[in-house]
Amino acid sequence: MFSEMFLPLAVMAASGAGAWLCGKRKKFAAGIGTTGLILGIISWGVLFIKNHENPDSGIIVWAIPILILGLCGAVHSLAYLKGHGEERSNLYYLFYNLTVASMLGVLLVSNPIHFLTLWELMGLASFALVAFDFQSGKTREAAWLYLLVCEAGSLFLILMFLAPDFSVMRFVFGLLGFGLKIGFPLLHIWLPQAHPAAPAPVSALMSGAMIPLGFYGLLKFTLDGCSFYQSAGIVLLALGAVGALGGILFSLPKTNIKELLAYSSIENMGIISMGFGLTLLSINQDSTILYCAMSGALLHIINHAFLKGGLFLGAGIIQKAAHSLDMEDMGGLLKRMPFSGSLFLMNSAGICGLPPFNGFISEFLIYAAALLAVCSGKLLLMICGIIVLIVLALTGGIAAAAFAKLTGAVYLGEPRTEKAAEAKEQSKLMTIPVLVLFLLSNGVTVLVGWGNRDDMPALFFVAVLSTAFVLLSALLFWIRCKALPGKNDVKRGCTWDCGYIAPTARMEYTGSAFVQPITDFCRFLMKPFRKIVPPKGIFAKEASYESETDDPGLARFWNKIFRWVSKLSEKIHVLQSGYLHLYILIATAALILMLIWGLMLPWCGIITGGVK
């Protein structure tokens, strides 16, 4: 029975409760929580394979990221929590296990009540994880915003289930409810706030596995069986195009590593949305476009999970080593952390979709679908195909610039602070999960290429080339980091400084300076706030440049709504006067209105029933 797959979820939840009962005994809490989670994940995977012929086995695309990232995040947490709230390990593992269990439970239910219950549990448990470092004011603000988004999403989902099946209203409410989780444009504001606040393993789990669940809900509860595929496809494609371009564009000026990665997640959700949009547009139109677009979108979910999960875990390693997430405080970490740094560099190349790295495979399929749409001869498909091609090309280029900024500012050059100069490789419990995710992402590439060797020989060729290139890069990194320094007496010195006798890290290009030409070109969209102190005199001692770019969705849309609601609340607050007579009057008036409404309903039925 498929229902037996709930038993591992009970094991995860029970182990989380056991960890909580351990109180301040952090080692026991970590041991019980991690062991129970690992056993639950393994047993859930075994039962899933056993029930693979079940009609619901299509959930594998969403289940794989949850299982793998849940496991890797739990192992990573064992070392990450030391010095980052280890004394609250019991609470961490309680909510971490509940989050993973509820995410898997969401995939197993179809009943609206059961689905909403598990969806709400997932939101509340992950809210507790986002608020884990509650001592920080920014963390509390991010957690509060995330909680509001979760509750707003649940409200829209309730309205979705109350709406008629296969109706436009059901699709709109579902788009809002699940779109808040995905991070569609204007609904994305929680992502750049929550990810920098949450612990790194939690960010990896949420970005790689939780936010794609919005697509699962959208496809299952709003689009399955509807009759307006083309209209829904246009909506998803438009939202995806804006999200992909906007997400990666606004990642450029960010200096917080995890904030940049959060905007990158918005971009990748946009790419997935464009893939599903092309899929819906090609239903009953062209089966080849449908196959390529759907395969590309589903594969990108898995690729993004492994690559972005590895990057967030890598950010956790950087934070532990350099005691900061501000890339402007770093530099030169590749010399000090060659193994984890090499993994971070290759994961960055993969997430940019640069050929022939593994992240390119899923985008290659969406590219192929868009090219086929352009060549289809059908006007709507041609226009949408051109839009997808342009957006994918632009996002790929901007993503390369954003991650070149990130990796260059963090790993290259010389350290800008003493903490960066003292950085070193962290525990293997932190680096091995990143390595596993990197290897799995390349393993998926091989499997996809091999599975399509007959239908799409070009994809098989690209997959083989990609895997060979990545493995060769990994080998060269290993030789550079391990073999050469140990076997050769290499003399090291500073690079050529044009005769300047005292080079410092301040002479290096910063990440902000690297992307300044692009941000200046797009300043009409970004509207950056700048504070410049120009150098004065021939031998200037002081000069500075600060640039800050607010999220347009939050600054130009939601903040105005929040202010309006606040003013309205202040006026309504007058009703909370403390006078019992006023409360009785309000309750009486409400009761009279309800009675009038109840008496009018039968008459409304008679009147509307007589109209043909």
Image (cartoon, grey):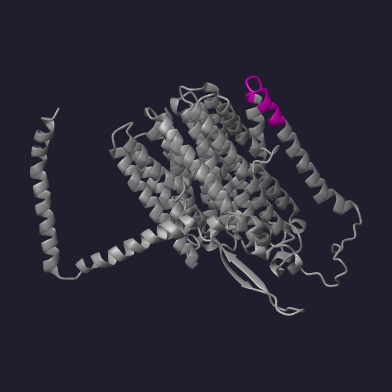
- 415, above or below 170, in the image: below
Q: Which x, y percent locates residue 193?
A: 50, 58
Residue 431 lies in magenta, yes or no? no
Q: For the point 62% across and 64% down, which residue is it? A: 324
Residue 458 lies in magenta, yes or no? yes
The magenta span reads 451-464
Q: Which x, y percent locates residue 474?
A: 76, 43
Kindly tell me whether residue 6 is visible in this rendering.
no
420 displayed left or right of 25: right
Tally the marks: 0
Quadrant placement of the C terminus: top left
- Where residue 394 sits, quadrant-wise, is top right
Is most of the magenta stretch helix, strand or loop?
A: helix
583 displayed left or right of 419: left
Q: Which x, y percent locates residue 464?
A: 72, 30
- 368, above or below 211, in the image: above
Of the pair 477 and 159, the residue shown nearer to us = 159
Q: Which x, y percent locates residue 50?
A: 51, 27
Q: For the point 53% across and 28% down, which residue is it? A: 49
**Can you name the residue that lies furthest to the top here?**
454
Of the pair 453 and 368, the residue shown nearer to us = 368
- Where residue 144 sits, quadrant-wise, is bottom left
